[in-house]
Image (spheres, coloured by chain):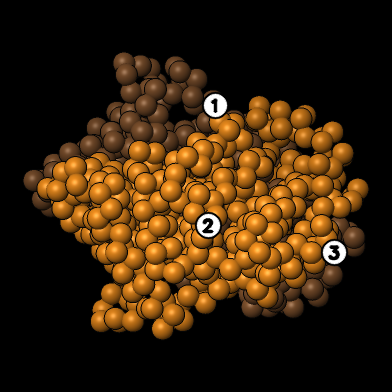
Chain colours: A orange, B brown
Amino acid sequence: MTPDQLLQGLLHGTAPVQRRAMAKSITLLESTRADHRALADELLTAMLPHTGQSFRLGISGVPGVGKSTFIEALGLYLIGQGHRVAVLAVDPSSTVSGGSILGDKTRMEHLSVHPQAYIRPSPSSGTLGGVAEKTRESMLVCEAAGYDVVIVETVGVGQSETAVANMSDMFVLLQLPNAGDDLQAIKKGVMEIADLVVINKADIDAIAATRAQLQITSALQLLGMHASSGHMHGDDSVWHPKVVQISALLNQGVDTFWAAVSEFKAIQNKNGRFGIRRQQQALSWMWERIDAGLKQNFRAQLRVQSLLPQLSQQVGAGQLAASTAARQLLSAYQAQS
Amino acid sequence: MTPDQLLQGLLHGTAPVQRRAMAKSITLLESTRADHRALADELLTAMLPHTGQSFRLGISGVPGVGKSTFIEALGLYLIGQGHRVAVLAVDPSSTVSGGSILGDKTRMEHLSVHPQAYIRPSPSSGTLGGVAEKTRESMLVCEAAGYDVVIVETVGVGQSETAVANMSDMFVLLQLPNAGDDLQAIKKGVMEIADLVVINKADIDAIAATRAQLQITSALQLLGMHASSGHMHGDDSVWHPKVVQISALLNQGVDTFWAAVSEFKAIQNKNGRFGIRRQQQALSWMWERIDAGLKQNFRAQLRVQSLLPQLSQQVGAGQLAASTAARQLLSAYQAQS
């Protein structure tokens, strides 16, 4: 199908035609073949005016925190409210493991078969940057097809959380009612990028859940105080990260969660940060792809490839200054290209 | 002076000749002029066989933690033990402020006038990467001149701590006896890169200092347990970060501190990590300079400069996909260069 046929399928297709167009569009965008890349750019440009109208919700949490159960409960709740829900995943480990999340749609058995839901596992294209780029583009496909809530799920390990936060309007961190966990989240810098922290499985131990809520709330205040002290004094048009308790298994608290999300959306729209965040995300995405492309071209160049092993060896052995080696490689690169 | 004359001054000069050669070498290495850069590379390469024998100690802490007092006490203690001590600084803010640390040598009034000490303020060359590169090269000059302990100081803000940790054999974090601080340090990811945490000003409140020591010790254990759980079980040839209390003002605990440093050195030498760390640092320094050079060349290219404003504007406004803009800019760059 041509990019235009794909776009027509996305925008105006009947349910089965639309689903097929989505799958084909995402496959095209994920392709690394040069001729596909040109078609993919054509599709992206044609699609763009029809994107951006969804709410992009990033959700993270360590394995075992109950992400699938939560997303299934949330997705069904939202469909009940008249929304159409897409679920994407960012899992850089999927190249190796075949996908630790969402590889198996049966994990969300009711949501995955619902006609108003679209679930897609993580692309397995290697680097985190590559996986993130493909997921961002898949998000645009879902938006063109009229999904108005796009959930991007990631595992709570490594830098995938930052990548997902950088493509989300709101980033939510799922935690267990366990005191030790918040230190881990702070350590990885994920607590400070969370707009909302959800304590899941609150049913298991109500006392622990409440203690965790208090601890994380005070940690968020302490982090926020230092990070943006200017906003702490009386500016109620600014969102302050909060902590809510839920039990996805018992289907309790999903409405509370969505009320917090709606409050966040309203505040971010009112103070203009919703648009600013998207603008910054788009520009930093552009620079990220430029940097990745520059590095890739550099490493692929024959002259660099022929010099690199020996210079690296000399630098590692302390026989050549790192900055001298860098200058030699850069001028070799510039001379050839 | 030629690179060879500078090197002779560094290696064999009398005290005043050597100091002059150090200052001139560092000035040459800091110069951005292309002809200087070639001479600087010549000097670096000639110097390299005479470098690497010092112990490189990174020290960080927020303003007010007492870094200068601590470094003065430590420096004088080490000179008393027969060492020669150089003190460098990494302060990326110095471009703007004229230097918030070490701009004023009188902050270490006894150490700064000692013939066995060499103190140099932060270079003010703009970006953190640039400042860090110059400081790494100054470190080599100090080593060629026979300084066997090189202390690199940085302020506890921003990413300068990571930069200093990446050029140190051991990275030390100074903390106040204040419970809230450890959360900040964890947040910034600095606690987990610290090989040793020093609670300074322990004389002010002995109870608070001991409480802080316990808290930080347990935080370090929790961070370390997850970061490298393989090393936590009985492998006593691996260093485990510790916490010591001192009072630099009362000159108490400097010997305890140095004993911990010596223990660290012995363990790192025995298990081979001392050399591995230096090798990794040199290679990552090389790649850092390559990446910085690639970006700089890209942004300096005329065709990129002429396309960038309009494409950035379109990406920010959601009219052009970020990855499409990145591909357009990269192919424009490749086409011209």
Residue under the image location 35 percent in, 77 percent down:
A238
Q: Are marks 2 and 1 in contact (CB under 8 Å)?
A: no
Residue under the image location 27 percent in, 64 percent down:
A256
Residue placed most toward the observer, B21 or B70: B70
Quarter of the figure with the C terminus of chain B: bottom right
| Residue B256 left/right relative to B45 | left
Residue placed most toward the observer, A186 or B149: A186
Q: Chain of mark 1?
A: B
Residue pointed to by mark 1:
B276
Q: What SS does tag 2 mark?
A: loop
Residue pointed to by mark 3:
B332
- State the image coordinates of residue B162 (x, y, percent, origin top left): 47, 48
Q: Chain of mark 2?
A: A
Residue under the image location 34 percent in, 65 percent down:
A258
On the question of residue B75 being in view, the answer is no
Residue placed most toward the observer, B230 or A305: B230
Q: Amino acid at mark 1?
A: Ile
Q: Amino acid at mark 3?
A: Ala
Residue B246, compared with residue B295, is above or below; it is above
Q: Are marks 1 and 3 in contact (CB under 8 Å)?
A: no
Q: Which mark is residue A115?
A: 2
Q: Residues within 10 Å of mark 1 (few under 14, many from 20)?
A: some
Q: Chain of mark 3?
A: B
